[in-house]
């Protein structure tokens, strides 16, 4: 990675984003030494303009930003760092420096759930319901999707709204499990639906 530090007197802006929620956590600045330290430690390290020294985020609070990935922009003068925060990021105690709650939006949670189920499929931990579904085989998983679909229809036509949402959620969960077992993800459904969409 060849960064251009010349435009801001030896510094480049570094945008830090939560690797899971995709929320922007903060903006800081790095010089070459701070960038090298970030790579070495695996923890986001800035050049503090007020302290005039390197500063590893969390060095006092313990709320480190553990690096997941680093990308440079097209001009090689800005960084996008995806990280896992070990606690609140802001010195005010907020989740982010923009006073946002660092959590999944309701829709974004589906992406997290897909990743979680993928991990279950890879690791197959004991005493996990998801593991038991994978071990039951594709026929049983497909049957569960069918059962949940019927229950969703029943609640939609003759039940309550709360039960309808509950059963529809069961249906989506079991569908993700079945997709995963077949080597697919929710994104594959999105791709197919996007192809069909006429606007």
Image (cartoon, rainbow, N blue to C red):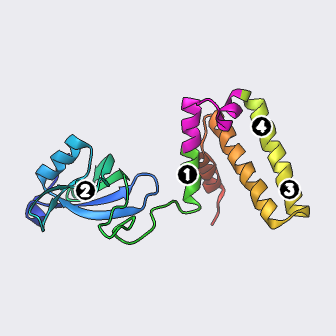
Q: Quadrant of the C terminus?
A: bottom right
The kind of secondary structure element at disc 3 is helix
Question: For the residues marked 3 and 2, what is the alpha-carbon distance in whole angstroms?
Answer: 51 Å
Badge 2: how crowded within 10 Å, few (<14), some, or many (20+)?
many
- Determine which quarter of the picture holds residue 93: bottom left
The kind of secondary structure the magenta stretch mainly shows is helix
Could you tell me residue 80's position as x and y percent? Answer: 30, 56
Q: Earlier in the sequence, mark 4 or mark 1?
A: 1
Numbered label attached to residue 142: 4
Report the residue at 61% width, 52% height from top.
190
Does residue 14 show up? Answer: yes
Disc 2 to disc 4: CB gap under 8 Å: no
The alpha-carbon separation of the residues under discs 1 and 2 comes to 28 Å
- How many other residues sit within 10 Å of disc 1, few (<14), some (14-19) or many (≥20)? some
Secondary structure beneath dot 2 equals: loop
Q: CA distance from mark 4 to mark 1?
A: 21 Å
Q: Callout 4: few (<14), some (14-19), or many (20+) C-alpha neighbours within 10 Å?
A: some
Q: Which mark is residue 57?
A: 2
Q: Secondary structure at mark 1?
A: helix
Q: Which residues are magenta?
A: 116-135
| Tag 1 residue | 111
Disc 1 versus disc 2: nearer the observer? 2
Residue position for label 3 = 153
């Amino acid at each position: 990675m060849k960064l251009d530090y010349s435009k801001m007197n030896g510094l480049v802006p570094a945008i830090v984003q939560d690797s899971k929620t995709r929320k922007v956590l903060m903006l800081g600045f790095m010089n070459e030494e701070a960038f090298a330290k970030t790579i070495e430690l695996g923890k986001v390290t800035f050049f503090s303009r007020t302290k005039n020294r390197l500063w590893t985020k969390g060095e006092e609070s313990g709320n480190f930003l553990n690096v997941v990935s680093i990308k440079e922009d097209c001009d090689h003068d800005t960084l996008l760092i995806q990280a896992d925060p070990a606690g609140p990021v802001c010195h005010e105690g907020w989740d982010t420096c923009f006073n946002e709650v660092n959590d999944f939006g309701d829709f974004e949670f589906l992406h997290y759930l897909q990743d979680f189920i993928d991990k279950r499929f890879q690791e197959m931990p004991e005493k996990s319901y998801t593991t038991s579904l994978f071990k039951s085989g594709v026929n049983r998983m497909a049957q569960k999707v069918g059962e949940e679909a019927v229950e969703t229809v029943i609640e939609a036509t003759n039940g309550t709204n709360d039960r309808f949402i509950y059963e529809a959620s069961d249906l989506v969960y079991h569908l993700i499990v079945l997709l995963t077992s077949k080597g697919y993800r929710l994104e594959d459904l999105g791709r197919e639906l996007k192809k069909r969409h006429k606007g």
